[in-house]
Image (cartoon, rainbow, N blue to C red):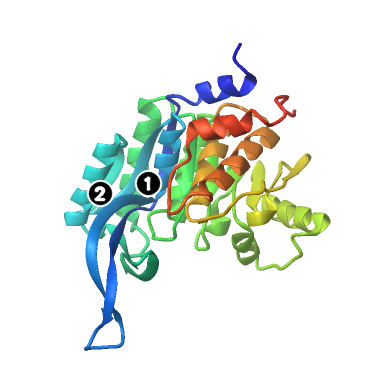
């Protein structure tokens, strides 16, 4: 007999999710450091391995895919060699490119990390963070709406990395279209557009983003102060729900009436990179399947902790998450 969680996880399969945001390539150069450059006091890395991975909003797509969903990335990239490389990686991964547009005035973001003897030595960012212009925004908006018309979209995620693909006018237009179609909208914000995400379903900042976005300070270990800050944010955005990730202190979620503070599970933390992408992915799928807020927040909290046990940015393992979920109380809260 299948459990409640078996059924929930099965329901995630094939869920169409639009992921709107800044997609990029995470490029890695691994090597050995055996001497210092005679030209400057810097290490010389003799490269032994190169790898290109999907990054930014594309990492959210990878997590959704790992959970069995069918993500569709929506973004504008450059019309350059790195765009070809990015599209090839998406193709190999089996992730839809239907929402990707090439822009003549954009470059494709590449973040190159140089690692010597397992130590991160240097990162080089090749990117622009200039906002899309009005014509580019309109083109991306048109593509997103056509995808909404073309297929059954069950949830939309804004994955914002402050690189300019997401603009206030794009946010307003997409949210309005989503509301007409009763499609929930979930946001993983950054600083630039923080207060532009009006009337979304679920807004998920981390603690630092919350404090900077509202220009407030408070003691997050004090339940009353945490709740007041969350409600202030919810009111400012007219959002249905706010979920705040609190690192080692877990997750707090409120819909204005019911509050849930879910503590972090004890883990052997290796790397927190990419945990936020995992959290937003699992929470969005739970929301799409109409799980109770306490339940999808609990699953997202579990998932974020699990990926922190791995080194580097890796998507969630669905089977591992299911095994951990089975240890939870199987009765969903209202």
Residue at 65% from the left image edge and 51% from the top image edge? 244
Q: Is any part of residue 215 visible from this angle? A: yes
Q: Residues within 10 Å of mark 1 (few under 14, many from 20)?
A: many
How far from the left and from the top, in percent, is residue 48?
23, 61
Residue at 53% from the left image edge and 34% from the top image edge? 320
How far from the left and from the top, in percent, is residue 15?
45, 27
Vertical position of residue 47 compared to residue 315: above or below: below
Q: Are marks 2 and 1 in contact (CB under 8 Å)?
A: yes
As helix, strand or loop, the secondary structure at mark 2 comes to helix
How far from the left and from the top, in percent, is residue 258?
78, 39
The earlier-in-sequence mark between 2 and 1 is 1
Q: Residues within 10 Å of mark 2 (few under 14, many from 20)?
A: many
**Splitting the image into 4 quarters, where does residue 118 fall?**
bottom left
Residue toward you, 195 or 328 = 328
Left or right for 190, reference 16: right
Q: Which residue is mark 1?
A: 58
Residue toward you, 123 or 115 = 115
How far from the left and from the top, in percent, is residue 23?
35, 51
Q: Which residue is mark 2?
A: 86
Where is the C terminus found, in terms of image quarters?
top right
**Splitting the image into 4 quarters, where does residue 30 fall?**
bottom left
Where is the N terminus found, in terms of image quarters?
top right
As helix, strand or loop, the secondary structure at mark 1 comes to helix
Left or right for 256, reference 63: right
Give the distance between the C-alpha atoms of the residues marked 2 and 1, in whole angstroms: 10 Å
Q: Is any part of residue 246 visible from this angle? A: no
Vertical position of residue 245 compared to residue 147: above or below: below
Q: What residue occupies the far front of the structure in this picture?
A: 34
Residue at 64% from the left image edge and 28% from the top image edge? 326
């Amino acid at each position: 007999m299948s459990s409640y969680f078996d059924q929930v996880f099965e329901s995630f399969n094939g869920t169409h999710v639009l992921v709107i945001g800044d997609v990029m390539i995470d490029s890695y150069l691994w090597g050995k450091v055996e001497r210092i450059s005679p030209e400057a006091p810097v290490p010389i890395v003799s490269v032994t391995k190169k790898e290109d991975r999907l990054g930014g909003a594309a990492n959210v797509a990878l997590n959704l895919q790992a959970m069995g969903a069918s993500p569709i990335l929506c973004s504008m990239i450059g019309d350059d060699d790195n765009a070809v490389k990015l599209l090839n990686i998406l193709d190999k991964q089996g992730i839809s490119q239907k929402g990707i547009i090439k822009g003549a005035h954009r470059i494709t973001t590449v973040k190159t990390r140089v690692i010597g003897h397992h130590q991160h030595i240097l990162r080089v960012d090749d990117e622009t963070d200039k906002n899309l212009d009005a014509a580019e925004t309109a083109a991306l908006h048109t593509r997103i709406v056509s995808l909404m018309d073309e297929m059954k979209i069950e949830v939309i995620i804004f994955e914002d990395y402050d690189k300019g693909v997401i603009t206030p006018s794009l946010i307003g237009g997409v949210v309005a279209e989503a509301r007409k179609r009763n499609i929930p909208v979930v946001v993983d914000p950054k600083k630039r557009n923080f207060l532009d995400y009006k009337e979304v379903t679920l807004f998920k900042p981390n603690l630092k983003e919350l404090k900077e976005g509202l220009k407030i300070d408070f003691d997050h270990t004090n339940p009353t102060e945490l709740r007041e800050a969350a409600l202030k944010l919810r009111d400012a955005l007219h959002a249905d729900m706010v979920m705040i990730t609190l690192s080692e202190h877990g997750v707090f979620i409120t819909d204005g009436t019911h509050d849930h503070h879910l503590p972090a599970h004890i883990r052997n933390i290796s790397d927190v990179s990419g945990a936020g992408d995992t959290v937003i992915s699992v929470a969005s799928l739970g929301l799409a399947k109409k799980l109770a807020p306490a339940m999808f927040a609990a699953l997202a909290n579990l998932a974020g902790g699990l990926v922190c046990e791995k080194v580097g940015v890796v998507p969630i393992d669905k089977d591992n998450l299911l095994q951990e979920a089975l240890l939870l109380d199987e009765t969903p809260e209202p």
